[in-house]
Image (cartoon, grey):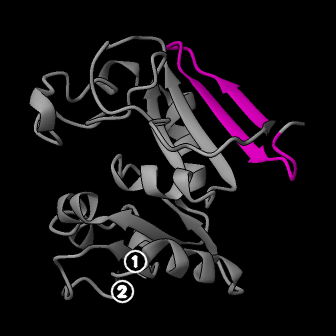
Amino acid sequence: MLEHITLDGIIQAPGGPDEDRSGGFAHGGWIGRYDDDVLGAALRKKMHAPFDLLVGRHTFDIWEPYWPNQTFWPEVNAATKYVASHTRTTSTWQETVFLAGDVPAQVAALKQQPGRDIHVWGSSDFVQTLLAHDLVDELWLMVYPLTLGTGKRLFGKGTMPASFRVVERIATPSGAMVMHYAKNEEWWL
């Protein structure tokens, strides 16, 4: 799971003011002033590794009209895109598979298959389902030095107990931290 997150745990609408205004959220686009070369290099490293993509429908609806027309992230177009949705069943974006019904069971089955890592970007509502069903093995958090006080949080009600260890940490000149965590086998470790 890859998330832009504030110190108070907000993950809603980091990229732009109109990305997700649900709940009256008025702080969209909060990552912009923290862009620097170190953060950019860390993001590009993660973006250019082979992966498959798992997102919620709302995030997919934002990405679908944009990313197929871009050339600077070819990996997202090559990735199989798994989309959790009870309302959508088709897309013209290549390699898109819609998941409905018992999505947690389907995600658990996907995780057992050999192949590329599965990246979850954004998807603030859908990540709650993944966390509640203990389906997150790694957290790759870009932590920004600000608080917003309101908005969708990464760890909401229903998050399963878990323990993580630091795999990598990167401090950026803008004050953001990139933190890579891997889950321990036993939650109390």
Q: What mark, if any, has residue 97 been given in the picture? A: 2
Q: How many marks?
A: 2
Q: Range of the magenta residues?
A: 167-187
Locate residue 18 relative to residue 55 in the image: left or right.
left
- Residue 24 at what x, y percent from top left? 9, 28
Q: Nearer the viewer, residue 46 or 167?
A: 167
- Residue 11 at what x, y percent from top left? 38, 34
For residue 171, above or below residue 161: above
Place residue 10 in its image quadrant: top left
Seen at 17% across and 41% down, the residue is 20
Place residue 19 in its image quadrant: top left
Q: Amino acid at mark 2?
A: Val
Q: Nearer the viewer, residue 176 or 55?
A: 55
Q: Residues within 10 Å of mark 1 (few under 14, many from 20)?
A: many
Locate residue 123 relative to residue 165 in the image: left or right.
left
Seen at 63% across and 57% down, the residue is 134
Place residue 166 in its image quadrant: top right
Q: Residues within 10 Å of mark 2 (few under 14, many from 20)?
A: some
Q: Amino acid at mark 1?
A: Lys
User: In the orientation shown, which residue stands out farthest toward the front?
Assistant: 158
Q: Nearer the viewer, residue 85 or 46?
A: 85
Is the Cβ of the residue at disc 2 closer than 8 Å to that at disc 1? Answer: yes
Q: CA distance from mark 2 to mark 1?
A: 6 Å
- Residue 48 at what x, y percent from top left? 55, 62
Q: Nearer the viewer, residue 49 or 137?
A: 137
Helix, strand or loop under label 1: strand
- Residue 83 at what x, y percent from top left? 34, 74
Q: What mark, if any, has residue 81 been given in the picture? A: 1
Tell me which numbered mark, 2 or 1, is placed earlier along the sequence: 1
For residue 55, above or below residue 79: above
